[in-house]
Amino acid sequence: MRIAYRAESLIDAHLVKDALERADIPAFVSGEYLTGAVGQLPALDYVAVLVPETSLAAAEQVVREVERDLQEARLALNDPDEDPDAPLPAFC
């Protein structure tokens, strides 16, 4: 298994894992239970999404798409000029 994505949070890890599985790429969230040991500290470098080595190239494209969608959603949430009643961008 190879690391396809290092997650900032468990939610991000599971979003990537779900997207990979929808693309028929088997995925596993590693370090998921380590976050409880560090309390309120960020999960950075503890949580990763792993895929089989043979699927790594295909997984990289899916991960890039998810990262782009996450970035767009975060920017939309932080944009003070945007209409607060407008619907949020759809993820995947």
Image (cartoon, helix red, strand yellow):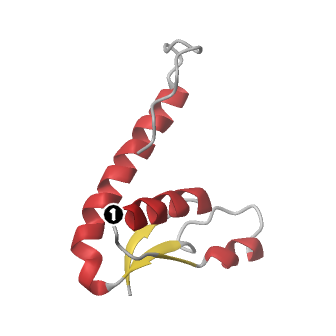
- Quarter of the picture containing the C terminus is top left
Q: Is residue 53 left or right of residue 11?
A: left
Q: Is residue 54 left or right of residue 76?
A: left
Q: Which amino acid type is marked by label 1? A: Ala
| Residue drawn where x is 60% and y is 63% of the image | 10
| Residue drawn where x is 27% and y is 78% of the image | 55
| Residue drawn where x is 49% and y is 13% of the image | 81
* In the rendered image, the vertical position of residue 1 relative to residue 41, given as above or below: below
The residue singled out by tag 1 in the image is 23
Q: Single out the residue that lies furthest toward the left.
A: 57
Name the foreground residue: 18 vs 81: 18
Residue 85 placement: quadrant: top right
Percent position of residue 3, x then y: 39, 78
Percent position of residue 30, x then y: 54, 79
* In the rendered image, the vertical position of residue 15 relative to residue 72, given as above or below: below
Tag 1 secondary structure: loop
Percent position of residue 4, x then y: 36, 72
Assess disc 1: are there few (<14), some (14-19) or many (≥20) residues with their C-alpha within 10 Å of its C-alpha: few
Percent position of residue 7, x then y: 50, 64
